[in-house]
Image (cartoon, rainbow, N blue to C red):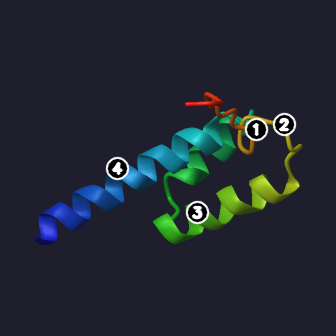
Amino acid sequence: MGNILRKAVENRRKKVINALITYHLNQEENQYLFELSLTELENEYRKLQSQGHPHSVLSSIQWQYKKFGQ
């Protein structure tokens, strides 16, 4: 059970780091990300989301197609 949780946390860390790397242009900042915990990474991600443009990649509009009359 512990290994499953550890693996899930590590996978989530990788996803958040990859999302943050797309917005950090400086390589030194990217290296810093690998030193943060999952909670710290998610806080950094939320901070970027709140500062970002509403149509940026982090908080882009998600289109949903619905069929009418069916």
Callout 3 secondary element: helix
Q: Earlier in the sequence, mark 1 or mark 4?
A: 4
Callout 1 secondary element: loop
Q: Are marks 2 and 3 in contact (CB under 8 Å)?
A: no
**Residue 69: percent from the left, percent from the top?**
63, 30
- Quick one: quadrant of the C terminus? top right
Q: Are marks 1 and 4 in contact (CB under 8 Å)?
A: no
Determine the CA span between mark 1 and mark 4: 25 Å
Q: Name the disc covering residue 42, or none.
A: 3
Name the kind of residue labelled 1 in the image. Answer: Ile
Give left or right: position of 33 versus 13: right
Residue position marked by numbered label 2 in the rendering: 55
Q: Earlier in the sequence, mark 3 or mark 1?
A: 3
Callout 2 secondary element: loop
Residue position marked by numbered label 1 in the rendering: 61
**Residue 20: percent from the left, percent from the top?**
63, 44
Q: Earlier in the sequence, mark 2 or mark 1?
A: 2
Determine the CA span between mark 2 and mark 3: 20 Å
Name the kind of residue labelled 3 in the image. Answer: Glu
Name the kind of residue labelled 4 in the image. Answer: Asn
Callout 4 secondary element: helix
Write the residue at 59% across / 41% down. Answer: 19
Residue 64 can be seen, yes or no: yes
Q: Badge 2 local density, few (<14 within 10 Å), some, or many (20+)?
A: few
**Residue 67: percent from the left, percent from the top?**
61, 28
Residue 37 can be seen, yes or no: no
Write the residue at 76% across / 38% down. Answer: 61
